[in-house]
Image: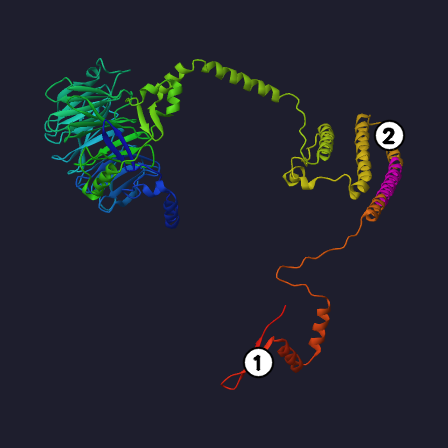
């Protein structure tokens, strides 16, 4: 639930928050609700209250139990049962719906005006009948006393279809080229229609004669309105027997008393967008007018704004639930919005829990952070020279600082630091210079570990790239850029020890192979530059030279390996001689042992006595122990004997 406030009027958006995908299983939905706090706190007042793509019209049945909405894609109607808080049925249609009307108190009789000039009737079980009108229709109204449907559209005629007789009647001929909207007064059944020329024609259904004409286009031009072009009528709504509100395509709403040709009040939305819906709220004498961007509520006597709402998506239709503070909108989005405004009235009886919920939210208000405010600390205020504003209405204390208007913050910052633009300019110049430096020739950065190996790989990579460019081949990946060998140039444990025996024995062979490879690359470059006619002869010479050079190379690296072996033996011999001299200079000293505390030192003869004693029999040892006093033997009253020993360490 999202709460907003304008003019101290709280608006609760019951459709705010993310919706879960339909294809998720119930188990995954429950898991998401446990993890995500926003999903857990959202309120789904009516289950699946949405359309696949876009919703165009929304209405409530007269008994208040059913909410019906039409939308796309594919064209369909969905009926929601408020007593069950869920969808009752869904029906797909052949063409897109322009508008529809609920003829009965419930959902049993519905009429649809479709794009292809079709008029479709539905009963409780589904599709009932379908017919066509001569021209494309834009709106229609139902006259209850005569059971006539009045259709207006891209024609000067108003078509009448009698539902009791089941046939078309004589049309009403108007002075307009086209008509956009129409409505019938619920009290005296006056039929009114808005034309493309910005006029409203009023007709009496009993005599089928025009009884009045209002020039709304001329009346909408006032000192407070901004109009571009000729306004046409886009919305029309009666209130009681005498009041009528008219919406224009340029964003003005005109309130008329039927006894006067001049409007009582002209209200401009200041967006220049056509008015799409007009509703009356009689308890507070409000008019709810909406274009595609904003919904405005204003007093019909003074024109003063009561509150307004700007949904995230464009608005197609607005429906006010009867005798309540609930407002529903059809939008250019799958989700249809539901708003609850407690000031307009109580919650409907099928969702009376909303009143308790809003009361709890008012008792436990949550602090909010606004986008058009800047959070500053006391130190920031001192730097800006605004410390004297502490305690005034321009600063709002919050946590360890204050909130201030973002516009005031920018002005104060410009006054406190007038040279901010110069600093910004210098910073941009410095960035440009660094960019040009990056384009220069840069030195190759060697890693910390195995620098010589990395330098060798870089040189070989450069040579291979030159050859690949000439032959137009793809470059092979470098070992320095390969993640598999990354540790070899970062971890010191992989440092190559050039003084080890293995390295010194293999180094002559590796160096000779690299030199041979370099000579071969150079030779291939020379062969490619020669002419094709002399290529075979020079290739033969090159191969002979290569074979002779290879034999010389083998003799060379064998001698180098022998030389390294000889050097290693000499070094080992020198090390042995040094260790021998160190052993001769060291003097051996006797080792002394310290007796632990609590023990007495006795001569080594004691161990010999113990060995002799262990060889004697048990009886001899008992006699000896009795003499020494370490053994005490006594008789008990029962007849047994008791022996006590004293152990010696």
Q: Where is residue 528? Give x, y as percent.
A: 79, 28
Q: Earlier in the sequence, mark 1 or mark 2?
A: 2
Please tell me how crowded label 1 is: few (under 14), some (14-19), or many (20+) other residues with Cα within 10 Å. few
Relative side of 510 to 43, left or right: right
On the image, the x and y values in percent for residue 15 come to: 30, 37
How many dots with numbers? 2
Magenta span covers which residues?
Answer: 549-573
Foreground: 439 or 131? 439
Q: Is residue 370 covered in magenta? A: no
Q: Classify the position of the C terminus by image quarter.
A: bottom right
**What is the quadrant of residue 20 in the picture?**
top left
Compared across the picture, whether 391 is left or right of 287 comes to right
Residue picked out by circle 2: 538
Kindly report the distance in space between the C-alpha atoms of the residues bearing marks 1 and 2.
117 Å
Q: Is residue 565 magenta?
A: yes
Q: Which residue is mark 1?
A: 633
Q: Residue 12 appears in which quarter of the rendering?
A: top left
Q: Nearer the viewer, mark 1 or mark 2?
A: 1
- Residue lying farthest bottom? 639
Indicate the secondary structure of the residue bearing disc 1.
strand
Task: Please tell me whether the stretch drawn in magenta is mainly helix, strand or loop.
Answer: helix
Horizontal side of residue 643 vs 260, given as left or right: right
């Amino acid at each position: 639930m999202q709460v907003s406030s304008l003019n101290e009027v709280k608006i609760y958006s019951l459709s705010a928050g993310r919706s879960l995908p339909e294809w998720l299983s119930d188990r995954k939905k429950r898991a998401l609700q446990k993890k995500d706090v926003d999903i857990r706190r959202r309120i789904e007042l009516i289950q699946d209250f949405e359309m696949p793509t876009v919703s165009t019209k929304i209405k409530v049945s007269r008994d208040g139990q059913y909410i019906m909405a039409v939308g796309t894609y594919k064209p369909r109607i969905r009926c929601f049962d408020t007593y069950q808080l869920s969808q009752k049925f869904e029906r797909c249609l052949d063409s897109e719906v322009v508008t529809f009307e609920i003829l009965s108190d419930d959902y049993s009789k519905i009429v649809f005006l479709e794009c292809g000039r079709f008029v479709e009737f539905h009963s409780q079980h589904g599709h009932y009948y379908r017919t066509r009108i001569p021209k494309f229709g834009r709106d229609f109204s139902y006259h209850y006393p005569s059971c006539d449907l009045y259709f207006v559209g891209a024609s000067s005629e108003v078509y009448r279809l009698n539902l009791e007789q089941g046939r078309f009647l004589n049309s009403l001929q108007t002075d307009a080229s086209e008509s956009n909207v129409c409505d019938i007064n619920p009290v005296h059944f006056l039929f009114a229609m808005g034309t493309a020329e910005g006029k409203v024609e009023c007709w009496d259904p009993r005599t089928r004669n025009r009884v009045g004409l209002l020039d709304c286009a001329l009346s909408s031009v006032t000192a407070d309105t901004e109009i571009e072009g000729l306004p046409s009528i886009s919305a029309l709504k009666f209130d009681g027997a005498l009041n009528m509100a008219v919406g224009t395509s340029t964003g003005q709403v005109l309130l008329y008393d039927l006894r006067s040709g001049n409007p009582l009040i002209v209200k401009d939305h200041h967006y220049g967008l056509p008015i799409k819906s007009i509703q009356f709220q009689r308890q507070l004498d409000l008019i709810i007018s909406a274009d595609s961007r904003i919904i405005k509520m204003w007093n019909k006597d003074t024109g003063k704004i009561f509150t307004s709402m700007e949904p995230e998506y464009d608005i197609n239709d607005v429906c006010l639930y009867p005798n309540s503070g609930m407002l529903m909108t059809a939008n250019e989005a799958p989700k249809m919005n539901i708003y609850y405004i407690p000031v307009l009235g109580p919650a409907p009886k099928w969702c009376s829990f909303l009143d308790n919920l809003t009361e709890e939210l008012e008792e436990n208000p949550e602090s909010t952070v606004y986008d058009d405010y800047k959070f500053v600390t006391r130190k920031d205020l001192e730097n800006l020279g605004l410390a004297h504003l502490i305690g005034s209405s321009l600063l709002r204390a919050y946590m360890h600082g204050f909130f201030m208007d973002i516009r005031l913050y920018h002005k104060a910052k410009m006054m406190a630091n007038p040279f901010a633009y110069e600093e910004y300019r210098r910073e941009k110049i410095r960035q440009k210079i660094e960019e040009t430096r990056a384009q220069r020739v840069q030195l190759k950065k060697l890693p910390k570990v195995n620098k010589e190996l990395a330098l060798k790989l870089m040189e070989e990579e450069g040579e291979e790239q030159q050859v690949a460019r000439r032959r137009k081949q793809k470059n092979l990946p470098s070992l320095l850029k390969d993640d598999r060998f990354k540790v070899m140039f970062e971890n010191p444990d992989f440092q190559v020890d050039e003084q080890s025996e293995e390295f010194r024995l293999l180094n002559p062979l590796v160096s000779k192979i690299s030199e041979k490879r370099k000579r071969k690359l150079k030779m291939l470059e020379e062969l490619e530059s020669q002419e094709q006619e002399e290529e075979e002869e020079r290739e033969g010479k090159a191969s002979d030279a290569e074979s002779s050079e290879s034999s010389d190379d083998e003799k060379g690296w064998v001698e180098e390996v022998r030389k390294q072996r000889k050097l290693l033996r000499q070094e080992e011999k020198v090390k042995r001689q040094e260790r021998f001299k160190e052993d001769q200079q060291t003097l051996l000293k006797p080792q002394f042992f310290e007796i632990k505390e609590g023990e007495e030192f006795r001569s080594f003869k004691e161990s010999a006595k113990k060995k002799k004693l262990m060889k004697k029999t048990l009886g001899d040892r008992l006699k000896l122990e009795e003499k020494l006093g370490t053994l005490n033997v006594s008789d008990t009253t029962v007849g047994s004997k008791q022996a006590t020993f004293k152990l010696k360490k």
